[in-house]
Image (tube, rainbow, N blue to C red):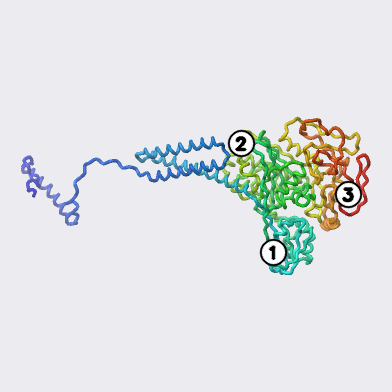
Amino acid sequence: MVSLGKFLDLSESAPVSRFGIFFWVQRWYYKLGDFMKKVKKKDVSVLNQPPIDTTPKKPKTPKKWLDWIEWVLALAVTVFLLFCLYRLSMFELQIVLSIAGVLLAFVLILLILLIKRKSGGWKATLYRIVLLLYIAGAGFGAYTLNNTYVTLNDITSARQSVIQIDLLTKADSSLDSVEDFAKKKIGYSNHADSFASSAAMADINTQTATVEYVDMNDYQQLYEKLQAGEIDGLLIPHNRISLLREEYKSIEKDTKTIETFKAEREITPVTSNIDISKEPFVVYVAGIDEGDDPSIDARSDVNILVMVDPQNNQMTTVSIPRDSYVPNPALENGSDKLTHLGNDGALNSMEGIEEAFGIDIDYYAKVNFQSLIHIVDALGGVDVDVKIDFNEQDENRSFKKSDKIYLKKGMQTLNGKEALAYARHRKTEGYGTTGRENAQQQIIQAIMKKLTTAEGISHINDLMNVASKYVATNMPLSAIQSFVSKQLRDVKPWSVDSITLKGGTDATLTTVSMPSLPLSCYLLSPDDIVKVYNAYQRMYDSSPMKNFAFNLSTNPQCTIKYPKDQSVSEFMITSAAADRLNPYSVYYGIDRVDSSNAGASEQRAQTNNIEIVVPQAPVYDYYVPSQPDYVPDTGGENTGSSEPVTPPATDPGTGDGDGTTTTPPSTDPGTGDNGGSTTPSEPVTPPADTGTAE
């Protein structure tokens, strides 16, 4: 027990004076008072306070678990970025490995800094900011590369085209379902659409098996039978309805759709073995104007050939008029408007163009018109010098005044809808098809120019999303990767030329897909055909230019010699034969004509007040093309300057597979029928009109 003296600190050294003892007592009096107050408040902590630890403490280690999570995320993003870069296959392996080395080294440095960091503060804050910026940048790069690969894979992996077939009946009909057509008559055209019709009928037969089918070649006649009540329904591909609309303006109001069937047609895979990173190639670009799915077969309102020479970095675009009168391979090579060929698929259009110009087309790309709106809007608009004042229907073909697009002449920034209206317009007098084709090329060039800007590049992911929805091509993904890889290895400027075909003539003619109604068509000139072939051949042959040769000395009707390798189809008809065409007959080459519907076609033309445009024939019966830009060197003497050649009968304006043209029999221009034959040295006397087809 502590003694009182010790508690009171009364040591020998303590003050013992009277005043010292007084002040000491007073001090402890107050201390004791404070102590008793705490005791009364039951605060007894003062009685058992632990002794103060005077041992030096170690500094606290900063918590780094959040930094570790960020670093692991950075490593994962880096690995995914490198995987996307490798999978895209557009960069050389050395470049990919170099990028991988730099990125992994950076991530390793971040790891070392994280391990060695001993304190928090501004260094930790800076570290986290750098790490987050890296994750954001690498993540955006990985997303862009992955999005690009997925989009390219989507647009190149299409193996089927889709045909939509509508079952129509009269708008006031009591028939409302397929089952209601039991013991009823349904019309169809096996001649025009055997595949689509068969698929739809098979579907109908699963729902009702007592339908009577009526087959006719002509949808116009089938439609009129429907309106007359002779048949109860009409099976017609959806893309053919737009053809009937040219004659029957109120078809949507006068009919109703009972059901829409779908038939999928297999697309033949591309078998071309060319290396497009080194060898020239041609792409046919078809702008379809139906729905929003590029896999659907529909009319091609835009038809552009893109000829690419990767060795010399040269590109030539050729706009082909949509109304060009060309063979339709799907309908026995009967003459048709080019836009109608798209109803049977892009491959059908490719084959028709190949026959018309004697060239080979390697790939196609189908682009839906809706994509133009989204592409231009994604880029924030494009700058175009509009050539005329005009107004045009909107993207939905609405005739309402409030829906129309109005544009003034001059340089301006067009949004998506305005760009589409400018690309479509052709009705202004004096502007026409040629003006529209120039406008389309203007817009394509404006888009390409915008894509090279910082703003365009910043919207690359938006453009990829648009492409995946509205673009389809049969070009293999591997070919695209090879082409882009070569361009990235050897970056050089490209020269872009454009060709517009304007040497032909307008004509009102009956087509194989609309055999009972004359339509506005465009006859290509031999000059235009040679011009396209020259541009095509120039990619393969760098020999010097030569002149065309023809000989009039022994033949008043000139014979011409086209380039030796140009194999224009015998079914192709040009403006050289304009005066031999009957506007009411269907042609399968100049010497095969079907006039079986000529009477009905003429009657419909009169009923619909169709102006029949009859083109004037050239001075000679056989057209002489002007001097071309180029004739390929065949390695020998130019045989075209020797003697006139008279091969088997073909269209004189196009030539055949061996580069010669012919002197076919004359035709009565009033009927389009042909008969008899002539020799080059004798004048041509048209035979009497027999009214039958050969």
User: What residue would you read off at disc 2?
Assistant: 486
Quick check: marks 2 and 3 in contact, CB under 8 Å?
no
Residue 364 in which image quadrant? top right
Q: Which mark is residue 674?
A: 3
Which residue shows up at 65% across the image and 48% down it?
Answer: 472
Where residue 182 sits in the image (x, y, percent)?
Answer: 72, 69
Mark 3 surroundings within 10 Å by alpha-carbon count, few (fewer than 14), some (14 through 19), many (20 or more): many
Residue 315 in which image quadrant? top right
Disc 1 residue type (three-letter) = Ile
Quick check: marks 2 and 1 in contact, CB under 8 Å?
no
Disc 3 residue type (three-letter) = Asn
Where residue 297 sits in the image (x, y, percent)?
Answer: 69, 52
- Residue 498 visible in this rendered orientation of the protein: yes
Helix, strand or loop status at disc 3: loop
Helix, strand or loop status at disc 2: helix
State left or right for residue 16 relative to residue 114. Answer: left
Disc 2 residue type (three-letter) = Lys
State left or right for residue 670 relative to residue 403. Answer: right
Mark 2 surroundings within 10 Å by alpha-carbon count, few (fewer than 14), some (14 through 19), many (20 or more): some
User: What residue would you read off at disc 1?
Assistant: 204
Distance Cα–Cα, label 2 vs label 3: 54 Å
Quick check: marks 3 and 1 in contact, CB under 8 Å?
no
The residue nearer to you, when weighing 284 against 467, is: 284
